Image (cartoon, rainbow, N blue to C red):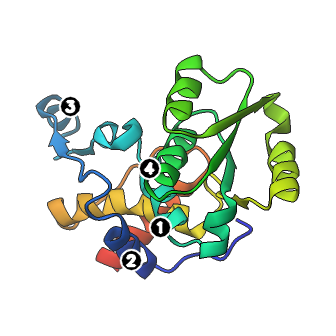
Amino acid sequence: MTTPTPEPTAVLEAAQRIQGIANHTPVHTSRTLNQQTGHQIYLKCETFQRVGAFKFRGAYNAVTQLTDAQKAAGVVTHSSGNHAQGLALAAKLLGVKATIVMPDNAPAIKKAATAGYGATIVTCPAIEREAVCAQLIEEHGYTLIHPYDNPNIIAGAGTADLELLQKTGPLDMLFTPVGGGGLISGTALAAAAVQP
């Protein structure tokens, strides 16, 4: 990670910022999983989150933390789907221009959904996404909202786990999918805030 690591309290602060904006997603159990594992399993259903993914949480939190000048200039990111949609919607809700660099091979439905939230889409070969973002930042003065290497993205992602722990109480184990690492980092911070 190239940015400062957020403190566990950052997740609590992010939860306040997104309250009433992000969906408070349900926690379900599965009798089948419980029987198969011999344990009580809880599932945090982020598919019920705005844009269908936890990514909205971090994106909204990150955009709220920009200065007025940064908001006026606009934001940029690179993503093939969920972060693109999350940032596009967050920016729209907060009145900020969003430009999303998406790979040429991103699913058409993801591109359409991102554009539907009002973002400008720039496509390029997948390996050129970061370079294209850097060029757009230089040309337009946008602020990069990195999909996972951003303390406000991480803290916002951690709010999903915070909600889970507030519903279930202490847990023996937490399992989190890993892509770029933002969700698992936020999950660890939330757990540290609630279960030090």
Q: Does residue 192 appear in this view?
A: no
Which mark's residue is nearer the viewer, 1 or 4?
4
Marks 2 and 1: in contact by CB < 8 Å?
yes
Which mark's residue is nearer the viewer, 3 or 4?
4
Q: Which amino acid does label 3 sit on?
A: Gln
Say what secondary structure mark 2 lies in: helix
**Location of mark 1 (residue):** 155
Residue appearing at x 28%, y 65% in the figure: 19
Question: What numbered label is drawn on residue 13?
Answer: 2
Say what secondary structure mark 4 lies in: helix
Residue 52 in the image, given as x and y percentages of width and height: 38, 36
Dot 1 or dot 4, earlier in sequence: 4
Q: Is residue 178 above or below residue 59?
A: above
**Location of mark 3 (residue):** 36
Residue 103 in the image, given as x and y percentages of width and height: 73, 29
Marks 4 and 1: in contact by CB < 8 Å?
no
Q: How far apart are marks 1 and 3 (CA)?
A: 33 Å
The part of the image, by quadrant, that contains residue 168 is bottom left
Q: Which amino acid does label 2 sit on?
A: Glu
Say what secondary structure mark 1 lies in: helix
Marks 2 and 4: in contact by CB < 8 Å?
no
Q: Distance between the residues labelled 3 and 2?
A: 37 Å
Which mark's residue is nearer the viewer, 1 or 3?
1
